[in-house]
Each structure stands twice: as structure tokens, then as C-alpha cells.
Amino acid sequence: MMAAGAAAALGASVTLIEKNPRVGRKLMITGKGRCNILNNCDVPAFIQNVPVNARFLYSAVNRFSPSDAYAFFESIGIPLKTERGNRSYPQSDKAVDVVDALRRYVLESGAQIVTDTAEELLLENGEVMGVKCQKRTHYADSVIVCCGGKSYPLTGSTGDGYTLARQAGHTIVSVKPSLVPLESPDNDCKSMQGLSLRNVGLKIIDTQSGKPAYEDFGEMLFTHFGLSGPMILSASSHLRDIKPGQYMASVDLKPALEAEQLDKRLQKDFLENSNRDVSNAFAKLLPRKIIVPVLKRWGVPFDKKCHSVTREERRRLVDILKAFTVPISGYRPIEEAIVTSGGVKVSEINPKTMESKLIAGLYFAGEVIDVDAYTGGFNLQIAWSTGRLAGESAAI
């Protein structure tokens, strides 16, 4: 929609080919239906939040920055607001309003929208001549492939763009899920299903080097299959090709307390519950669902009296609370990922125009390219910036 509207606004004759009955289905589910439309940050901060091929995006995001996108959406009738982490949303909190406004923008710019499925690029002598679709063939001197990745296939992003790009001779960097929950073989996750932890510290440890592959502070969630929530989704985009036993999540359940402070807190709690079983002494310290998993790891009998806990046992408990570990075995399926990592190789695309270096008149934009960012509106900004640049370049 951004590419079509930008091209049509410059006077090009534009046809947007959409295989769904309605445009923008994937936008409808972003930000839990609220649409985290962009991250209201400056360009350097944006670049820092793109772990994959950030340099490729310099031209696009400088031409159409987050502040440009903010002004654009307000100009097409979407008043925005900015919340925690510079995440911007429509003031209405409705993704449908964004979709409707973009559709209006496309039509009012002069483009037409047709419902059809692109099957094949028409190529001749190193140039694009149009697109063969299921219902009819559309001839054109420029074609922009911007049909998303492979995540959330029910919204229409079923990997068609990779097929079209391969047909034009492009290399597709291996596709994998990004911003996706993580699986764990630990049965404790299942027993804690639905438990959301807020204001906790997270480290994803590479067990071979012993060094953190990712660190964060915030919110996470235990599920029947493992771990989810904002920090986990962000962590997933840092992990490449998870092998069994390679990564371990370490959660600091009490990040506000240093080990010594936490030990004093435990002494206080055990003193208050002096004649009670240790299993009954954690109600004020921990959420109910995590108490048994912590006790199991501690290894002290559940019916041991608080007054008989030794200093060494208390120190061991501090270590567990400061580093509650969960092994990671892999990603959830790509169908559950927010974005797809991988795609059309960036070295085969001109970053100043988004045009293919292999086929004249062929352009790419958005998730089909091998670029992806962290959660927080950055991936949609990639769509806005590359879509805008591709549309304007194709129209010239």
C-alpha cells in the first residue's frame, strides 16, 4: 500500500495486486490488534534495532524516517500517540483504522486495487515486462514485489515473493522465524503455563562459550511449550540456528536486589515463618506457580522447618532466584513468528532505489528482503521506508 500510493502520487499508473479479498490483513493483527505502527525514535536508534543488514537500510530510512512516517500517518487521518519504549499507536487503538486509511491513500493517489494472485514474473532481455496472475496478465514497465515473508500464512504471506524472486535469478537467504516464542524441554514450563513475570532480568547464555548471547529486562511468559513474551521474542532474533543444548535462558527473578540484600530478605522471611515448612515461606516473595519449581531446584525437603535452613542452603537459594535457568531447544514454527528472517539477498538490490541489480524494473520492499528488526514498531518502519523508496523509484 505504501509503495502503490507513493508511486501513484507521482503520476504513475499503478495496479496493486492483492490475493486476499481485503488489503492489509497482516496489519490488522499487529500490536495485538492495536497496530504498533512505528517506533518514534531517531535514525541512529532505529539502525541499532535492526540486527540483520541494517546498513542496507540507511538510504531508505534517511529518505523516509520514523518522524517522516509519523507525520505521514497523521496527514492521512491517523492521529498517533507514543507509549513506553517509543512505540507509536493510532490514538483509536484500532489497527483497522490504519488499514482503512492506507487503502484510502492508495485509491486517492490514483492507484487501483485488484484481487488476484501473482504467479509469475514476465521477463525479457533482463527486464521485467509484467506479472502473470491467476485471473489475468498485467503488463508493466516496473514491478514491485512486496508480499511479505512466510510468517502468519493465513494473512496471505505464504512465501510467494521468494518464488518470484528466484524466478528472476535472485538468491534467497535461508528463511527462518524471528520474533518468535522459544521451545523448552523443561516440564516446569508446562506447570507454570500462563505465568507472566514482569520486571525480571533475562540472559540467554551460549552454553559453549558461557557468554550471554542476549540480555534484557522486562516481561516474559511461561507457556505449555516453553517461553514467550516481549523479551523472549526479542531474544529470538539474536539466536541463529538453535542446536540442542546450545542455549540456556537464565532469569533473575529479583533483579532489584543484590545477592546480599536477597539473602537478608530470605533471613527475614524465614524468621517470620520460623516454625513453618519452607514450602509455605515464599508467598510474599514469589508468584504461586513458580514456588514448586524453585523448591525442586533448591533440593531442600519441602517440609523442612524454616528455622533449620542453613546459611549454605540459603546461599544456594539466592543463586537459584538470581539465575532461574530454562534450557532452550528451538523456535516455535515459522507460522507463529511475527516476522521472517532471511529473504532476497541485499547485495542483489540497489539500496538507493530498491531496484534489482539483476533485472531492470524489478523492485523489492518490506519483509521479502533479508532484513529484520526487533519488536517495537521497527519492522513496520522497514515496510514504510522501503515501500516508499521502491514506489518513488519505480515511478520516476
Image: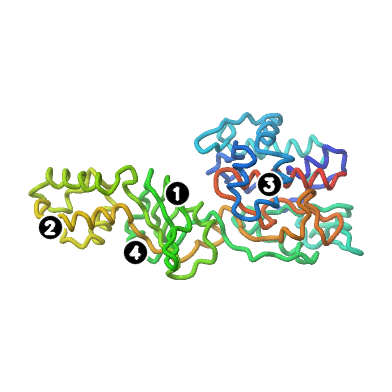
| Mark 2 or mark 1, whichever is nearer to me | 1
Determine whether the residue tagged by mark 3 lies in a helix, strand or loop: helix
Going from the N terminus, do you reach mark 1 or mark 3 first?
1
Q: Residues within 10 Å of mark 3 (few under 14, many from 20)?
A: many
Label 3–label 4 contact, CB within 8 A: no
Instruction: Give left or right: position of 185 versus 57.
Output: left
Q: Residues within 10 Å of mark 1 (few under 14, many from 20)?
A: some
Label 1–label 4 contact, CB within 8 A: no
| Mark 1 or mark 4, whichever is nearer to me | 1
Q: Amino acid at mark 4?
A: Asn
Spatial CA distance of label 2 from label 4 is 23 Å
Q: Residues within 10 Å of mark 2 (few under 14, many from 20)?
A: few
The spot of residue 376 in percent (x, y) is 55, 44
Q: Amino acid at mark 2?
A: Asp
Going from the N terminus, do you reach mark 2 or mark 1 first?
1
Q: Which residue is mark 4?
A: 187
**Residue 223 position (above or below residue 257):** below
Q: Which residue is mark 1?
A: 216
Q: Amino acid at mark 1?
A: Asp
The spot of residue 27 in percent (x, y) is 62, 45
Determine whether the residue tagged by mark 4 lies in a helix, strand or loop: helix
Q: Residues within 10 Å of mark 4 (few under 14, many from 20)?
A: few
Q: Which residue is mark 3?
A: 383
Q: Which residue is mark 2?
A: 303
